[in-house]
Amino acid sequence: MMRILTVLTAAAVVLASHPLSAQTPAQRAPAAQPDSALEAMTTRLASELRCPVCQGNSIQDSPSELAQQMRDVIRDQLRSGKTPDEVRAYFVDKYGEWILLAPRAEGLNLIVYLVPFAAVLLGGLVVWRTVRKWTAAPPSSTADTPPG
Amino acid sequence: MNWKRATITTGLILPVIGLLAFGLTTDPKMIDSPLPGKPAPEFALSVFAPGEGQLARNVGDTVRLAAHRGGIVVLNFWASWCLQCRDEHQDLSNAARAYYDKGVRFYGVLYNDQEPFGLKWINEMGGQAYPSLLDPRTRTAIDYGLYGVPETFLVTADGRVAYKHIGPISERLLSQKLDSLLRAGASAP
């Protein structure tokens, strides 16, 4: 009786550890671990989109419920095969260009990108002219003085 | 006086003042929606609050926007935690009753809230004339570019967003917008 039990136990152990009867670690991996590439792209896109209920926060940085749900939308759309551009386009379509934390460098948006450079150039010019004026040799006060 | 210098300085300062004035007089929370004029996002949402009388729908019924082609739909996003939603509640119910015979259908959509709280709120407010729908994971709200409640959308008979209103809407404004849409629909070939 003991021998039969021992044989049955050994058989059960062998069957349980057999590759055909159990999931291999490689098979379990996708379900157990998050897709790091998907998460990385979700994080990147979420960092580019403005949170509608906060002031100046991205939906990645916002703790609000809506931002969380928008991150889920990004993740689901990427998972369904949409490209990052298509996901961005979806949010622009719903919220307008406003949703992009960095507006596209085209059309009137160019002002946002060019004005800081123009301001720096203009400021530099003013500083240069002022410094030049200060360092210029003062007019000689004795040149036209009649000999005393 | 050096007129040239004064003109250049004024020319540089005025745009900055204009920009500051624009920034100070514009509410950063008022986001222009790109949706008006575009096809309204489709939805299929289930009824959790039935509405009243002839406007009622069975709890659990699925309401599809696509099934409303040929009639105007008013979609109001609300929540039990939203104080401003209280201000417009009666106006929406009045308008829903007044325009039912003209083919206008009103639906509430619960935003970031739970069904029991929504039902309790409706009860506290003395009822809601039109049905309210659940929006799991806020997908429909995001499809409509929502960023707060209350927000109200008017969808034309051919399924386009005609108007988006942010904040509490009055019965008078609703009547104006609906009359205008009904007239436009009647005069269309």
Image: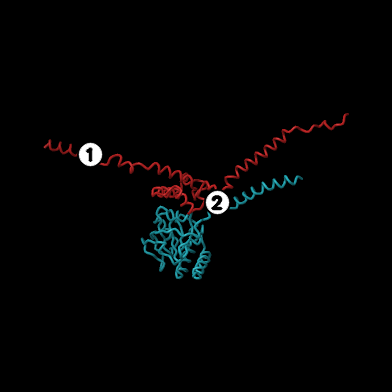
Chain colours: A red, B cyan
Please name the amino acid that badge 1 sits on: His
In depth, the one of B12 and A85 nearer the eye is A85
Please name the amino acid that badge 2 sits on: Pro
Q: Is residue B72 above or below residue A44?
A: below
Which chain contains the residue that carries disc 1? Answer: A
Q: Secondary structure at mark 1?
A: loop
Q: Residues within 10 Å of mark 1 (few under 14, many from 20)?
A: few
Which chain contains the residue that carries disc 2? Answer: B
Horizontal side of B118 relative to B21 (left or right) equals left
Q: Secondary structure at mark 2?
A: loop
Kindly check if marks 1 and 2 are in contact, taking CB atoms under 8 A apart as contact. Answer: no
Q: Is residue B119 visible?
A: no
In depth, the one of B136 and A140 nearer the eye is A140
- On the same chain, marks 1 and 2? The answer is no
Quadrant of res B73: bottom left
Give the residue pinned by disc 1: A18
The image position of residue B108, as x and y in percent, is 44, 60
Give the residue pinned by disc 2: B28
**Residue found 57% across the figure and 45% down from its top:** A113
Q: Is residue A20 above or below residue B187?
A: above
Q: Is residue B157 above or below residue B24?
A: below
Rendered-image quadrant of the N terminus of chain A = top left
Rendered-image quadrant of the C terminus of chain A = top right
The image position of residue A129, as x and y in percent, is 69, 38
Horizontal side of A131 relative to A99 (left or right) equals right
In the picture as drawn, the residue positioned furthest to the front comes out as: A106
